[in-house]
Amino acid sequence: MSDFWNVFNERGALLAIFGAMGGAVRSATLKTTWREGLRVIFIGAATAFGVGVLSPILLKPWIGDLPEGMAGALGTLCAAAFMVGLVAVTMIERFLSGKDLTTGKDDD
């Protein structure tokens, strides 16, 4: 049972919350329907939780290199989780359609 709590701890909850907030901002910005909004918020939270501490590495093409020791800081992780929640739906849709994640162009 302790292994369960090692995965679902406070840091994981914070990452999921910030991912959900990123999804909510995307949904509000694009003025989606409430159903689409719930989908985007759920995907943002689940993706931010699942990616976890790898968020700064995943976002490296967009945010660049971080200073030494900053990748594991809670503030950096929460900011990266927010950004993952913000772009998760777009990245997943591009991946499933076979487009490049950074440019959005078709992979040939």
Image: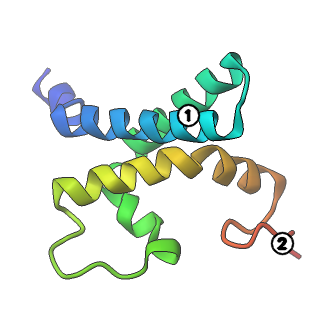
How far from the left and from the top, in percent, is residue 78?
Answer: 29, 49
Residue shown at 87% from the left, 69% from the top: 106
Examine the rendered structure and indicate whether residue 105 appears above or below residue 35: below
The kind of secondary structure element at disc 2 is: loop
Q: Would residue 104 appear left or right of 58 to someone viewing this image?
A: right
Q: Report x, y in % for residue 62.
A: 51, 73
The residue that appears at 26% across and 36% down in the rendered structure is: 14
SS of the residue under disc 1:
helix
Query: Type of residue at label 1?
Result: Ile
- Quadrant location of the C terminus? bottom right
Residue 103, image quadrant: bottom right
Q: Residues within 10 Å of mark 1 (few under 14, many from 20)?
A: many
Residue 31 in percent (x, y) is at 70, 32
- Taking depth in this image into account, of 57 and 80 the one nearest to the observer is 80
Query: Residue at the spot x=64%, y=43% of the render?
Result: 89
The residue singled out by tag 2 in the image is 107
Local crowd size for mark 2, using a 10 Å CA cut-off: few (<14), some (14–19), many (≥20): few
Q: Of label 1 and label 2, which has the lower sequence position?
A: 1
In 3D space, how far apart are the residues under numbered discs 1 and 2 (Cα atoms)? 24 Å
The disc label shown at residue 43, or none: 1
- Checking the image for residue 88, the label placed there is none
Q: What colour scheme has been applied to the protein in the rendered image?
A: rainbow
